[in-house]
Image (cartoon, rainbow, N blue to C red):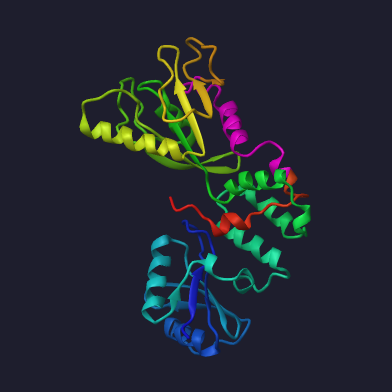
Amino acid sequence: MAAQATILTARAPGAIAILQMHGECEHDVLAPLVKLTARDDWPLGRLRLAPFADIDEGLAARLTPTLVHLMPHGGPRVVQRLLEWLAAQGVRIVRSEAIEARTLYPEAETEREAEALRALAQAASPAAIDPLLAQSALTFNSQDVTGEDRARSARLNRLIHPPLVVLAGPPNVGKSTLSNALVGRSMSIALDQPGTTRDYTAAMIELRGLVVRWHDTPGLHETNDPIEARAIALSKRLMQEADLLIAMTDSDHDWPALPRSPDLRIANKADLRRRDDADAHLAALAGEGVPELVRRIRDALIHPGDEAAAFRRPWHFESAITSAPAR
């Protein structure tokens, strides 16, 4: 039977990636390892610097007779080329979710600890680390789990897979200015001219330890431009899928007509004039109110106290691993 290879580290750029190769017998992993590194002396438990074909140079180690770890540089293209090379040698490339956690993490003392290590490898948010480490040391039985635990787990799983946050509103109310302020760079063109953003723009941003998929949508309005109309239609589909839908306007515009009720309504340009029907106020251009908005967004996605509860109550992070979002 051919060896299997999987990526243990998060599927994102990083300094070092870790690939695991596992087989049913010693030859399954030794044959591709010897060919990859052009060396045949691989004693157990030794970490060695070796060339990886003509792709990269990195560390490799045989942890058991049938288990090898390869540690190339973490650039996505390097990892992709290495996986392609292994596949060409007959190694089967599989997602880590398809492999038992104890096989992936033989150093784990319990199944729960192995699952926590798997979740750590996938977690996008820094705030996931401490609660997951705490969970690995806790034991629960099914009778311990309450409905509140399940609801909290669903929210905490957003620490593993970033939730989708969509910002929507009419043109020229400051959506792009807010998005740029949160990202810390220009992800959208921000001009005092309606319709500057013709398509939605997206970025991964960190909100106090929680990473979210932030989408800034084009201004919602009637248009005869077929390209712009198509972009608005696509954005409305995205709004339906959002974990958090934010409606944004200012004192000169009405609230936008959205395909579903927004979870949060924010009024921009509050330094000029405030309105009474908003959940939050800010002046995005001046940066006023942005920290408070970040707090409100984070609290809407992961409730205050959820992370503290994970140090003493069950967190069913396994469901986030087995049902990773495709989008």
Question: Relative to residue 295, is residue 27 depicted above or below?
Answer: below
Q: Residue at x 45, y 40 (%)?
A: 241
Q: Residue at x 53, y 77 (%)?
A: 60
From the viewer's side, name the closer residue of 271 and 276. 276
The stretch of residues the image draws in magenta is 283-308
From the viewer's side, name the closer residue of 8 and 141. 141
**Visible residue check, residue 195:** yes
Q: Is residue 103 left or right of residue 258?
A: right
Is residue 291 in the magenta section? Answer: yes
Question: Relative to residue 213, is residue 123 depicted above or below?
Answer: below
From the viewer's side, name the closer residue of 1 and 126. 1
From the viewer's side, name the closer residue of 207 and 90. 90
Q: Is residue 103 left or right of residue 140?
A: left
Residue at the top extreme? 273
Q: Is residue 49 left or right of residue 252?
A: right
Instruction: Count all numbered tags in the image, as a single digit.
Output: 0
Q: Residue at x 33, y 24 (%)?
A: 191
Q: Residue at x 39, y 76 (%)?
A: 87
**Visible residue check, residue 41:** no
Question: Relative to residue 43, is residue 313 depicted above or below?
Answer: above
Q: Quadrant of residue 237?
A: top left
Is residue 127 in the magenta section? Answer: no
Q: Is residue 195 left or right of residue 152?
A: left
| x, y percent for residue 192 | 33, 20
| x, y percent for residue 96 | 53, 66
| x, y percent for residue 305 | 72, 39
| x, y percent for residue 16 | 51, 63
